[in-house]
Amino acid sequence: MKTLVVVSHPEINNSQTQQFLQEGAKLQDVTWHHVESLQSIDVAKEQKLLFENDRIILQFPLYWYAAPEGLKHWEDQVLTRNFVYGDGDDNLADKEFGIVVSTGMPLTAFRRGGSENFTIDEIMAPYYAIAKRGKMQIMPTFTIAQFQYLTEKGQMQLLIDYQRFLTQEYPDTLTHRQEWFEREFTDRFKNFDGTNCNECETILNTFIQQSEDIEQLKSTIGLIKKGEDE
Amino acid sequence: MKTLVVVSHPEINNSQTQQFLQEGAKLQDVTWHHVESLQSIDVAKEQKLLFENDRIILQFPLYWYAAPEGLKHWEDQVLTRNFVYGDGDDNLADKEFGIVVSTGMPLTAFRRGGSENFTIDEIMAPYYAIAKRGKMQIMPTFTIAQFQYLTEKGQMQLLIDYQRFLTQEYPDTLTHRQEWFEREFTDRFKNFDGTNCNECETILNTFIQQSEDIEQLKSTIGLIKKGEDE
């Protein structure tokens, strides 16, 4: 599966959040695509990029309840009617569509009676309307609130969640999560030279053991249910 | 009451709808402000303009479920945090806020199961979130669907509705409507030289007569209700 991250930020080098995410996105089959860095927009090239990827992520900070103007510029140029839905050419159909949005406000602000009064999902309606128009599969919004206040542990958690959002099989089931962790752990430990990570193998073995335990528990529950049904 | 119409359209001279609306907006105390025509954005000047008006209208065609990029550019520059809500300076508070949005799709497309699947109000959430943030009074969205298919009579109706949206007192009650029509009829007839509009005085008199009839009917209903209560 190939993932395209369409990033919009007018001053990306000054954004701690985007710098952090960019490091996290250095994964196999993930393309980081910063729209404000494009000298000019080559519509055919952009459309080809969209077409070649299986998961399209729009990523941006929330500026007045939407992406910065750079993304709208990109949308209005690249998403031609014919490419998205005209003449029966559903070039985006069945691709997965996700949004990674960051905000300096706390998550609790985004609800009725909160200082923003609208939920993140409500505010994201225009983007989900595009995805729906393109017959794409919509993933839940990935919201990063107040990155600057995250502890180091919180940042690590965010990193893993973000990487799963980019590359883990959809939908986010326990099985897909297990598969993702097992694959990623194995891949990453291979690249260590051993001296850097003494505990790695132990962690991996523990993880695999726990996965097996879960499978066994599921099987037991299955048997109990079967017994109840009979 | 002073009204500011902030218009965004990248090719406004080629837009029949916008040309039509621009003619309609030639009213006393209405300022037409086309953002793409600005050479550069003078933030202080734009903020002064907003501050001096009592009703702020955002007007644009729907491009991918939002305004064209020009409006987002204007928003991101002009609506500084401090101007809108920072430091207790609620410079927009209590002003009236309205949206005039045009679309080439029929209105019936904007509902669950319709080809757009989202309502216009859902799609407009980001703008209403700004208005809410600025403690403004929100007017119902003024939607113009498929202008090109309107009959001449339909266009005339649109013109009047649009002019009422710009200048009639809010909310849109029967009394406010009557006041608006009486004022506008009187003002406009004054400017005719008589030869152009033979029926004008008759229309005005008929309208005033009907308004009086309505008042009388209301008063009668009031008496009946009073009788029922006793």
Image (cartoon, coloured by chain):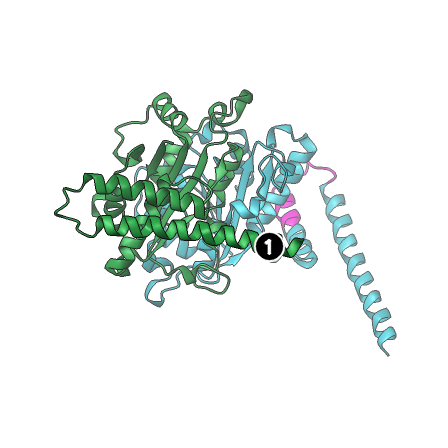
Chain colours: A cyan, B green
**A210 or A176, nearer to the observer:** A176
Q: Is residue B15 visible?
A: no
Q: Residue at x 23, y 45 (%)?
A: B19
Mark 1 lies on a secondary structure that is helix
Q: Is residue A77 above or below residue A113?
A: below
- Identity of the residue drawn at 36% across and 67% down: A88
Residue at the spot of label 1 = B225
Residue A144 position (above or below residue A128): above
Residue A184: horizontal and vertical position, in percent? 63, 49
Q: Is residue A144 left or right of residue B213?
A: right
- Residue in front for this viewpoint, A34 or A113: A113
Q: Residue furthest bottom?
A: A230
Q: Quadrant of residue B181?
A: top left
Q: Position of residue A47 (x, y in %)?
A: 35, 53
Q: Is residue A86 above or below residue A28?
A: below
- Picture quadrant of residue A160: top right
For this orientation, the residue located farthest to the left is B195
Residue found at x 47% / y 50%: B123
Please rate how many residues cluster around mark 1, counting C-alpha atoms within 10 Å: few if below 14, some from 14 to 19, many from 20.
Answer: few
| The stretch drawn in magenta includes residue A194 | yes
Instruction: Look at the image and tell me in which quarter the C terminus of chain A lies.
Output: bottom right
Q: Please indicate, yes or no, whether residue B211 appears anywhere in the rendered image.
A: yes
Q: Amino acid at mark 1?
A: Lys
Asked whether B82 or A32 is in front, the reply is B82
Protein chain holding label 1: B
Taking the image as shown, residue A156 lies to the left or right of residue B186, namely: right
Q: Quadrant of residue A216?
A: bottom right
Residue A2 placed where, x, y %? 49, 54
Q: Magenta span covers which residues? A: A184-199
**Residue A106 in the image, given as x and y percentages of width and height:** 63, 34
